[in-house]
Image (tube, grey):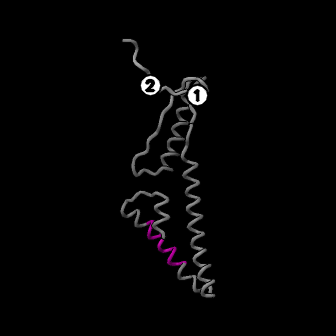
Amino acid sequence: MGKELRTGAATHDSQEVVMDTVFMLIGANSRTVSQAVAAKMEEIRRTLPPGIVAKTVYDRTNLVDATIRTVKTNLFEGAVLVVLVLFLLLGNVRAGAPALDYVRARSGRAVSRRQDFREGKRLHALGAARV
């Protein structure tokens, strides 16, 4: 008896709103997906009637960009640290050059092998594969 219980309502500032979630396919590039969703949201916003607003609540683009910057910085600093430690231990800048070349070669190999085996391009995994 009575009405069905309503579930799944979303509110914002005590007003009912429509909420949606975007899912990413396994193995998809999160940066590409985030950018595509942002572009689609802009397209949707242009078609909405006056008074209706589409607002993105959470956008992963900034998080992904910050993570990429962090990994690049950490990889660079790690290579510099290896050369610096070798210089301090051996007292010769040229002694650090082969180690730096090895680190660069391992980084390139890690990236290419991940592409060869079609592995996901997770940034934390790429940083670990470099070591």
Asked whether disc 1 touches disc 2, contact meaning CB atoms under 8 Å apart, the reply is: no
Q: Is residue 70 left or right of residue 125?
A: right
Q: State the image coordinates of residue 24 (x, y, percent, origin top left).
A: 43, 45
Please give the name of the residue rendered at 63% of the width and 87% of the height, measured from the top-left corner. 91
Q: Which residues are magenta?
A: 100-111
Q: Is residue 47 magenta?
A: no
Circle 1: residue type: His
For residue 9, above or below residue 27? above
In-front residue for pair 66/46? 66
Dot 2 falls on a residue whose secondary structure is loop
Nearer to us of marks 1 and 2 is 2
Dot 1 falls on a residue whose secondary structure is strand
Q: State the image coordinates of residue 124 (x, y, percent, origin top left).
A: 49, 60
Q: State the image coordinates of residue 114 (x, y, percent, origin top left).
A: 41, 63
Residue pointed to by mark 1: 12
Our reading of the magenta stretch's main secondary structure is helix
For residue 7, above or below residue 101? above
- Give the Cα distance between marks 1 and 2: 16 Å
For marks 1 and 2 on the same chain, the one whose residue lies earlier in the sequence: 2
Q: Residue furthest front?
A: 1
Please give the name of the residue rendered at 44% of the width and 70% of the height, measured from the top-left corner. 109
Q: Is residue 117 left or right of residue 41?
A: left
Q: State the image coordinates of residue 77 (x, y, percent, origin top left).
A: 60, 69
Label disc, if present, on residue 7 of the rendered structure: 2
Q: Is residue 109 magenta?
A: yes
For residue 99, above or below residue 10? below
Q: Quadrant of residue 82?
A: bottom right
